Amino acid sequence: MLSECKITSSSVRAFTVPTDAPEADGTCKWDKSTLVLVQLTCGSTRGLGYTYADVSTAKLAATLNAELVEGRDASTHAAILQSLYARVRNLGISGIAMMAISAIDNALWDLRAHRLETPLVNLLGRVRDGIAVYGSGGFTSYNDDQLRKQLGGWAQEGLRMVKMKVGTQPEDDPRRVRVAREAIGPAVQLFVDANGAYTQTQALRLANEFSACNVSWFEEPVSADDRAGMRHVRERAPAGMDIAAGEYGYTAWYFRTMLEAQAVTVLQADSTRCGMSGFLDAAALCWAANLPLSSHCAPSQHLHVCCAVPRAIHMEYFHDHVRIERMFFDGFCEPHEGQMAPDLSRPGVGLTLKESDARKYEV
């Protein structure tokens, strides 16, 4: 039995990494990503967790650690989490506040597994040894050659599913989808993500056009906040086309309302926004609803938890985050034949920060 172990210190750092090309989706443009890293120390044991967020998230996470985490027993993880939720009540349990809490929550899970000297997936209870990933990119800012090279490259590497962005120029999206289908061939599944850019009428018209290219996944065809609109599209989408959303869920209450609205055929969750604890909540709700679950972005942060929940079907292998996680962490698990599998020789989530590689991006 482990004795009490107080969290003796914490650190919060932010790293901003420029994209390798301009990127855009149906509602947003960006040229950089910021990783906020939380590290918690318990004696000689350290755990890490992270989120992708604004630098302001790091400031709040540092404040929360100083006020409510340092000096606490690491085994009182659930109590710490409840105190963090209460602390940000007047800030709102979403956005920056929840991303700060999520990074701390993720670090606590990693710390607990490190204390037991076991991979996190074993602490959670392994359901599977590995999980499929889908290559995610295909930004609307890409020209046809960039689109072909990225999506076709993933297909050649053995990924069996790829996703592209749509929605910036709806009238051109059917042509771009045809370009993507030609690049990946008939055997690879093709997903599209509108990031809520379409109206209901546009989404349904384009869903039918996309189905001619065997598109099997339509993510956020309309705003995920429009539950009635999501359900309208789900009920009328072509047979065999999944309707997915949930990446902006910060709490179990959000995931519950998404399922109660019957807005999706696949629920998404992102542990950099809801924490691994929230991801486990989403997984339990999917189990109860007999609905599939998929993780959003940050593949290294999701690998262990996705191998520990029954309804998980795949993870998003997002271009920007794969670049960053490869650069920043020893222990990044490369896909093999379209799947990622945890390294069971490494404790926790299996990641160690590459100080020299990460430091040049620190802000």
Image: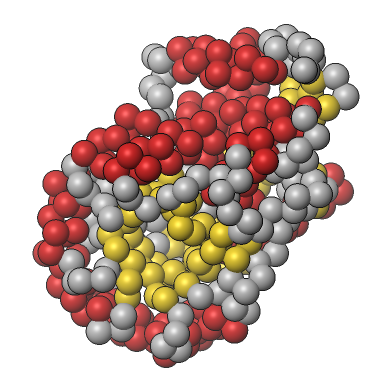
Display coloring: secondary structure
Q: Position of residue 193 (x, y in %)?
A: 36, 63
Residue pictured at 28% horizontal, 55% vertical:
265
Q: Quadrant of the C terminus?
A: top right
Quadrant of the image occupied by residue 18: bottom right
Is 152 drawn above or below residue 28 in the view shown?
below
Q: Is residue 290 shown to the viewer in this render?
A: yes
Residue pictured at 38% horizontal, 22% vertical:
92
Quadrant of the image occupied by residue 40: top right
Which of 162 and 195 lies nearest the eye of the viewer? 162
Q: Position of residue 327 (x, y in %)?
A: 75, 57
Q: Quadrant of the N terminus?
A: top right
Is 184 drawn above or below residue 340 in the view shown?
below
Q: Position of residue 53 (x, y in %)?
A: 54, 40
- Give left or right: position of 286 versus 142: left
Which of 44 and 201 lies nearest the eye of the viewer? 44
Quadrant of the image occupied by residue 332: bottom right
- Give left or right: position of 120 versus 164: right
Which of 55 and 45 lies nearest the eye of the viewer? 45
Residue pictured at 64% horizontal, 31% vertical:
109
Which of 27 and 138 lies nearest the eye of the viewer? 138
Q: Is residue 362 shown to the viewer in this render?
A: no
- Give left or right: position of 57 versus 228: right
Residue pictured at 43% horizontal, 45% vertical:
269
Is 309 drawn above or below residue 91 in the view shown?
below
